[in-house]
Image (cartoon, helix red, strand yellow):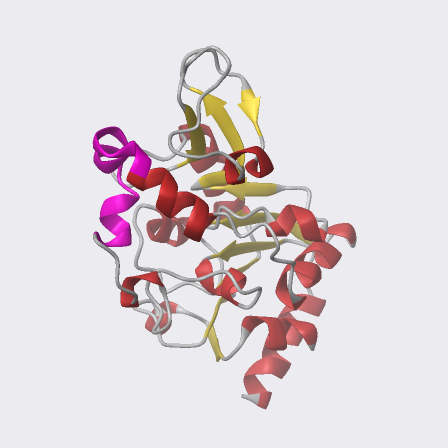
């Protein structure tokens, strides 16, 4: 572990072109539940699996149940950035980090101070009326009941990518550009199980691919460095 950390520190110190690609494990250390971890949402009891509730079909067919789950489990507005979020913002301020590409929808990277954040799956902090496109923040959504309605009568939909929905093409294109040009690509807090997001790492062309995660991933054999452990703890030492 110590040897891997030293190698990672040397990589970080020797470059000004880092790209970070992160998943749920970055946010769990801020108290936000994961879907797939042992203590995650998949291991709790609901009338429907979270993957079903968070699908486009379910949103259309059972919007009240969707929004009940969404308010209860997806709007973690009291969460604060952890050491990993803060370190990434610090690297960006120093000119070392070019972009944060995240699968998370919680906005914690921005709260920590990161400026160039590519949100592959959208954000709970952006919500729009499906009829007139008026914007509503997450605080407004948290305090609504039933299906949230705009003053015009339209349904207010979170700007998050649901299952069965496609990712934003512009965001995907930018992510590919940053990854393909990166010197050091750090992948942290993700099992690399969710596609098409996980497939983005195939665009990396360098030789400093770093995987930081608590558990093994399907891509460990491809990595130039694997560091297992808490991402917040590891990053706080860099």
Compared with residue 182, is residue 173 higher up or lower down, i.e. above or below? above
State which quadrant residue 184 falls in.
bottom right
**Residue 179's x, y, as percent?**
49, 48
The answer to if 32 sits in the magenta stretch is no
Residue 157 visible in rendering: yes
Is any atom of residue 162 visible in this view?
A: no
> Within the magenta stretch, is there residue 63?
yes
Frontmost residue, 128 versus 173? 128
Closest to the observer: 228 or 69?
69
Magenta stretch: give its range.
48-64
Magenta span main SS = helix
Extreme residue toward the front, this view: 145
Q: Residue at x 60, y 81 (%)?
A: 5
Taking 214 as reference, is 47 above or below it?
A: above
The spot of residue 80 in percent (x, y) is: 65, 58
As drawn, the residue found furthest toward the bottom would be: 2
Residue 183 image position (x, y, % from top left):
57, 56
Q: Is residue 127 left or right of residue 65?
A: right
Which residue is depicted at the point 49% across and 46% down? 105
């Amino acid at each position: 572990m110590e040897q891997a950390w030293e190698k990672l520190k040397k990589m970080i110190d020797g470059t000004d072109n880092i790209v970070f690609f992160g998943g749920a494990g970055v946010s769990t250390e801020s108290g936000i539940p994961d879907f797939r971890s042992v203590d995650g949402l998949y291991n709790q009891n609901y009338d429907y699996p979270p993957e079903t509730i968070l699908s486009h079909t379910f949103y259309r067919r059972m919007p009240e149940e969707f929004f009940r789950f969404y308010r209860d489990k997806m709007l973690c507005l009291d969460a604060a950035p952890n050491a990993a979020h803060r370190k990434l913002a610090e690297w960006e301020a120093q000119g070392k980090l070019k972009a944060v590409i995240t699968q998370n929808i919680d906005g914690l990277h921005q709260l920590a101070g990161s400026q160039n954040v590519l949100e592959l799956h959208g954000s709970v902090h952006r919500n729009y009326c499906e009829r007139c496109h008026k914007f509503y923040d997450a605080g407004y959504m948290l305090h609504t009941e039933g299906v949230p309605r705009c003053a015009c009568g339209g349904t207010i939909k979170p700007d998050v990518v649901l299952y069965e929905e496609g990712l934003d093409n512009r965001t995907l294109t930018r992510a590919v550009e940053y990854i393909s040009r990166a010197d050091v690509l750090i992948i942290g807090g993700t099992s690399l199980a969710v596609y098409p997001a996980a497939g983005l790492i195939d665009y990396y062309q360098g030789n400093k691919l770093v995987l930081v995660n608590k558990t093994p991933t399907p891509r460990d054999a491809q990595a130039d460095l694997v560091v297992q452990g808490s991402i917040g703890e590891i990053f706080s030492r860099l």
